[in-house]
Amino acid sequence: MKKLNIGVIGCGFMGRTHSNAFRTAPNFFNLPYLPVLKSICARSPDRAQSFAAQWGYESFETDWRKLVASQDIDLIDIASPNDTHFEIAIAAAKAGKMVMCEKPLGRNPAESEAMVKAVEDAGVANMVWYNYRRVPAVTMAKQLIDEGRLGRIFHYRTVFLQDWTISTELPQGGEGLWRLDASVAGSGVTGDLLAHNIDTAMWLNGPIDEVTAMTETFIKTRKHNLTGKDQPVTIDDASLFLARFKNGSLATFEATRYARGHKALYTFEINGEHASIKWDLHDLHRLEYFDHRDEGKLRGWRSIHITDSDQPYMKNWWVPGLQIGYEHSFIHQAADFLIALGEGKSASPTFAEALKTDYVTSAVLESAANRSWVKVRSL
Ligand code: SOE
């Protein structure tokens, strides 16, 4: 097995999910490359050092530019806050490195377009971590749709609900809370949460043609951790939109961090001519399926436990009936990247595919600002 030397930038929540994915993938999948955790990069030397020790990195670095310039590194994986994605990805591509990037790709389409150009000009493999596609139940939804089981699609309904920013005492900015500062994050729940719903939706149901949206910032001022001062909140706390897909189906999307009682309720439901499917992140190993072609007296929603070896990814795990979890979606994505690389390709979603999601989120924000329908740009 050829070695692939990886430099990961960022040791927060996503640094951990990615590190775990690279470490675990070769134990469960037959891969053409062995991922080597070569170096971890974080601004704080203490954090980088202890992260390196905990996750088995050979070395640590505090300056991402050194990592990008290093002859020892084949692939740069960006798991740092959104305002760093653009500069690092472009420098890495120019240095001839493969690039993986945490979602969303850029803070806005202009950044993302430049990132797409950089990886395409350099001809380097690239991928964005939209991990939920690789939850086996979600991958199976894709298979059922592609097999034509649902028939013509009429409706797509999806939400991503959280409740962690309701307190007025919660500050914005800095470690862990940069998601509340639009200068770092790009936007609020539109880019952070709806981007997931949009990526999955377009993967399952094709391109989105037009949107009309509303957003709200419920708490207008919060103390900023970096300045110590009360500052205006610049993100959208909630974002809801209607969409028309190119295939003619109609959709509703909703994301908020103000849905008391919900921690990460990502759900979607798709209604087709013959059948419908439903999925819920809180019960991620199940796919709900209703098929109108079933015998009438037995017709009903089936709750399919996605743990058998003929269901996506599951032959690589335990024995039928034993389920897997959130972190496995990242392991699957790392494995798919390495398998695609062995075939000389980039795994989906590439930077170019993730740019299409950014075109939708930017249309949503524009529509909310103008209170109008907005056509989504296409590549
Ligand atoms: C925000 O709370 C967050 O961690 C997102 O940033 C992730 O992308 C999402 O998967 C879970 O929620």
Image (cartoon, helix red, strand yellow):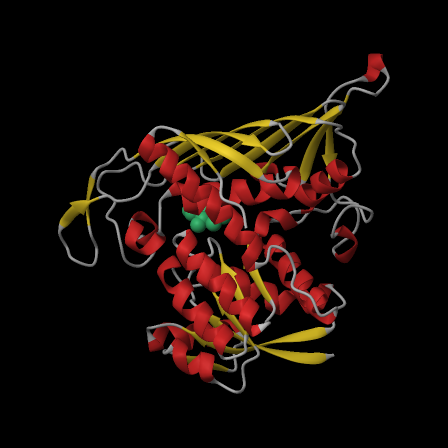
Q: Is residue 307 left or right of residue 278?
A: right
* Image coordinates for residue 353, horizontal then vertical, percent: 57, 53
**With respect to residue 99, does 306 lie above or below?**
above
* Image coordinates for residue 194, horizontal then vertical, percent: 47, 40
Nearest to the observer: residue 160 or residue 47: 160
Which residue is located at x 37 percent, y 38 percent? 366
**With respect to residue 194, does 7 lie above or below?**
below
Q: Residue furthest left?
A: 229
* Image coordinates for residue 124, horizontal then vertical, percent: 59, 72
Which residue is located at x 83 percent, y 12 percent? 297
Q: Quadrant of the N terminus?
A: bottom right
Which residue is located at x 62 percent, y 53 percent? 329
Nearest to the observer: residue 137 or residue 78: 78
Q: Is residue 154 left or right of residue 309?
A: left
Q: Residue furthest right?
A: 295
**With respect to residue 353, does 164 lie above or below?**
above
Which residue is located at x 27 percent, y 38 percent? 167
Q: Is residue 16 visible?
A: no
Q: Is residue 59 left or right of residue 330?
A: left
